[in-house]
Each structure stands twice: as structure tokens, then as C-alpha cells.
């Protein structure tokens, strides 16, 4: 089963991570070979072959902090892309806020009905 996190007011610490992919084009779908980003539903251990022929594996990343540190999850690389994936589940339907920050580009897909991209750069 794919990673599921409860909406409970706490930070999301459990993610499925895939990467790094060579390149940092936020508009490129690096998951095209497995039916694309819009249809991804990975499980731990699922693999994908990159355009360069490298095999990458979806791994569980469990943060000990209140952030998902991709440097720790995939290593320190330049000009690469990585995916962090999880399902969010609540006890009942409700409106909620999910806050996201990054010092690089970010693309989000908040639900299967909605595809929304946002690119933001946070200046230190």
C-alpha cells in the first residue's frame, strides 16, 4: 500500500522518495515511463528506469525532524529532481491547510481531481 499520513495537525514525516533524476526542469514529467505523474501511486520498493537507463527505487523516508530533508533522503546533488509522495487521510471531510516551503522549485498535485503546479523560490 502507498504511504498514508493522517491529517492531525502535525508535520508530515513519512514519505515515499524517488530520485535523483538528472535535470531540474520542473515542467518535465520524469515519470512518463510509468504512466506519468498524474497517475503515480507508488509503493515501497517500486522501481522506475530513467531516460539515462538508471533504475531508481521508491524508498520510505521517515524524518526525525519537522521537515522532509531531501538532501538526507537522496543525497547532495546539483541540477536534479526528486519526488516525495504520500496520501493524506482524515477522519472526516474537512477544509484544511497544508503549508509547503522550499529553497528550490516545487510542484504539487493535491488530489486526483486537481493538478496544480506552483513554483516558488524562498530567499534566505
Image (cartoon, rainbow, N blue to C red):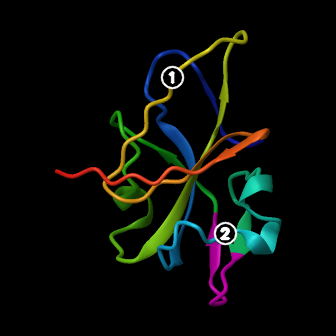
In the image: residue 79, left or right of residue 8? left
Q: Residue drawn at (47%, 73%), measured in percent from left and top?
A: 24
Specify the label residue 58 is tagged with: none
* Apparent side of residue 98 relative to residue 54 in the rendered image (left or right): left
The image shows residue 23 at horizontal and vertical percentages of 49, 79
Q: Is 65 placed left or right of 63 in the picture?
A: left
Taking 85 as reference, is 78 left or right? Answer: left
Q: Residues within 10 Å of mark 2 (few under 14, many from 20)?
A: few
Q: Which mark is residue 29?
A: 2
Element at label 1: loop
Other-residue count near label 1 (Cα within 10 Å), few / some / many at <14 / 14–19 / ≥20: few
Q: Position of residue 66 (x, y in %)?
A: 35, 33
Give the residue pinned by disc 1: 97
> In the rendered view of the protein, which quadrant contains the N terminus?
top right
Query: Can residue 3 be spotted in the picture?
Result: yes
Looking at the picture, tell me which residue is in the foreground, 54 or 45: 54
Q: CA distance from mark 1 to mark 2?
A: 26 Å
Q: Position of residue 101 (x, y in %)?
A: 37, 42
Q: Which residues are magenta?
A: 49-57
Q: Are marks 1 and 2 in contact (CB under 8 Å)?
A: no
Amino acid at each position: 500500500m502507498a504511504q498514508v499520513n493522517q491529517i492531525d495537525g502535525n508535520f508530515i514525516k513519512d514519505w515515499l522518495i524517488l530520485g535523483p533524476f538528472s535535470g531540474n526542469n520542473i515542467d518535465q514529467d520524469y515519470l512518463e515511463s510509468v504512466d506519468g505523474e498524474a497517475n503515480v501511486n507508488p509503493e515501497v520498493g517500486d522501481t522506475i528506469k530513467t531516460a539515462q537507463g538508471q533504475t531508481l527505487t521508491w524508498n520510505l523516508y521517515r524524518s526525525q525532524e519537522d521537515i522532509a530533508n531531501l538532501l538526507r533522503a537522496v543525497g547532495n546533488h546539483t541540477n536534479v529532481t526528486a519526488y516525495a509522495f504520500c496520501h493524506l487521510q482524515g477522519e472526516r471531510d474537512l477544509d484544511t491547510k497544508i503549508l509547503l516551503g522550499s529553497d528550490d522549485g516545487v510542484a504539487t498535485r493535491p488530489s486526483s481531481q486537481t493538478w496544480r503546479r506552483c513554483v516558488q523560490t524562498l530567499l534566505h
